[in-house]
Image (tube, rainbow, N blue to C red):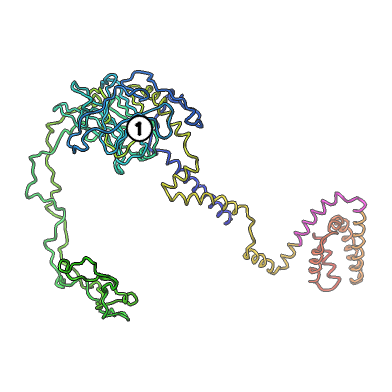
Amino acid sequence: TARMHFQWDWLCVGVLLISSVTAEIENEEALDADVEVEDFDKQSQEADVDREKSSLEVVYQTPKPTGEVYFTETFDGVLAGWVLSKTKKEDTDDDIAKYDGKWEVQELKENRVSGDRGLVLKSVAKHHAISAMLTKAFVFDNKPLIVQYEVNFQEGIDCGGAYIKLLSSSDDLNLEYFFDKTPYTIMFGPDKCGEDYKLHFIFRHKNPKTGEYDEKHAKRPDVDLKKFYLDKKTHLYTLVLKPDDTFEMLIDQLVVSKGSLLEDMVPPVNPPKEIDDPSDKKPDDWDERPKIPDPNAVKPDDWDEDQPSKIEDPDAVKPEGWLDDEPQYVPDPDAQKPKDWDEEMDGEWEAPQIRNPKCETAPGCGHWVRPMKNNPNYKGKWKAPMIDNPNYQGIWSPRKIANPDYFEDLHPFKMTTISAIGLELWSMTSDIYFDNFIICSEKEVADRWAADGWGLKKLVASANEPGMFSQLVTAAEDHPWLWVLYVLTLALPVGLGVLFCWPAKKTDEDIDFRRTDLSKPITMGEQNQERYELEDDEIELEEEKENEDTAEGERREMEETKRELIKDTKMLGREAPHSEGEGEGGEDIYDDEENEVADGSQEEADKSNKSGSEDEMKEADESTSSGDGPRKSVRKRRVRKD
């Protein structure tokens, strides 16, 4: 039982190890347990094809919008409508203030789809600015706003952004002068610098009282965004704003953040109704101390504040072999004065100090000083114990007054109209790929657009994915402890096979246990019980054999047994006293014996083939009585009793 428990424990450990490796690989491919999966539109699923197709077999067609749109761009044809900025960035050195970063239209470096091209940021440590007018302006009224585009950090990303700006409508909007101060309504997209991975959603809200604009930032997503910046794959970024003042941010059609424009923006859209009174000041006698020293406490007379915290250990003894006359450091004998050393300018040259080699084999060198130990009499400076402050008034805070700037905007969705889209970026990494911009109001239109563009890129990337072995190696490079799980996982089936299939060897304990059982003395009662059990077993075997014996053989055995019993009975009669009563008794015994023999002849016939060991047991049993006559009488009566 213990061995089986041990084997089952190993089996459970193996299952747990395999589950851990599987879960780790799945975690590398999943966003987070809290990520909500956005339902795909039925039309977007039409683009799902066999995953085994290579990139060469994918037939690409430029996506075409299937409904009302405000802006689309695939970059597959002539780059028309886009305007490069000619201005400079304010408050920046002239060397880098100009927006002279290069843009090119190219195919992807990896997992390319023939014919599919995108806009690529090419320069490093440069300001880039490019923009285009919308097909028609988007007015925030009763329709949702959906903004969607693709980004691929083909070289990873060190520090830089890939966000877009939706520029506010105005009469003086000139795209040639698009720069960081150009008014925008929404900024959305990925941004990263150092180890700070962000997904921006910022909108500029107009104060209805002052007419000024304030930036409102969405709270950070709760999921880990690092994967999307480092895997060198094309990812789909989507922002959905709804007329009910809610928003959603999606990556690859997975919801990574959602909330309310009224409750989940920083700072809040609406200011507080009350604010601290700026003219209120804390009174001079306001006591904020919850505890104070006990004014009635007195320092004890035996309190010695002059005692040091450390004293020399009087019990310490200088180690034997201590070199008192040897310094710990000596001039380096191998050092030489530099040739350009000027004693008038640099002073007298001295060789650098090195540790005294004689001290390395000794307990120590130089003047021996007793070690220090804690002073048992040290108490430190006396302080009165602390008690509750009877005059404690709590932490002071200014009184509240009505906020003179308070307003309430119940529908922040109604933002400033959008009329242009722009990319105004700085990056320390090149080859950032943008593609398939769309601005619309219907989710079905955006999903179909994604299926025709990003969906094909995703399929090609999946078809070109490395095998399971390569994925395991890659995962182990990021998490070296996985190598231990891999080794255990490979060794586990072998170990389990040996445990369950290898024949178990008899241990010395088992042999000693059996020898102990054999060496135990057997009592007369136990011997009789074993004999009876053997007789019962042999009777059952003989009954099975009876069906095979002939009737003639049975009669012969019965007659032979009868004659032997009659002969034995006559011998008993001769040996008994010859009295009349006894003679009658003898005849009765004879009659009884004859009847019993007749009744038990079948049983005696069954017992005729008993083993030698049983006969030996009977002889041992008979030897316990004295004399031939009594011994036989006992045997006959035992047969009759049985």
Q: Chief secondary structure of the magenta span?
A: helix
Secondary structure at badge 1 equals strand
Q: Residue 620, position in %: x, y?
A: 79, 69
Asked if residue 541 lies in the magenta stretch, the reply is yes
Which of the image's four quarters has the N terminus? bottom right
In the image, is residue 504 above or below residue 379?
above
Magenta part of the chain: 531-553
Q: Is 536 or 407 nearer to us in this picture? A: 407
Q: Is 569 or 194 nearer to us in this picture? A: 194
In the image, is residue 310 above or below residue 476?
below
Taking the image as shown, residue 566 lies to the left or right of residue 504, namely right
Q: Is 284 or 139 nearer to us in this picture? A: 139
Please report the residue visible at 44 percent of the width from the left and 25 percent of the height from the top. Answer: 60
Report the residue marked by disc 1. 433
Please report the residue visible at 44 percent of the width from the left and 51 percent of the height from the top. Answer: 481
Q: Residue 571, position in %: x, y?
A: 91, 68
Taking the image as shown, residue 541 lies to the left or right of residue 182, namely right
Q: What residue type is labelled 1?
A: Tyr
Please report the residue visible at 41 percent of the width from the left and 46 percent of the height from the top. Answer: 478
Q: Residue 512, position in %: x, y?
A: 64, 67
Taking the image as shown, residue 355 lies to the left or right of residue 305, namely right
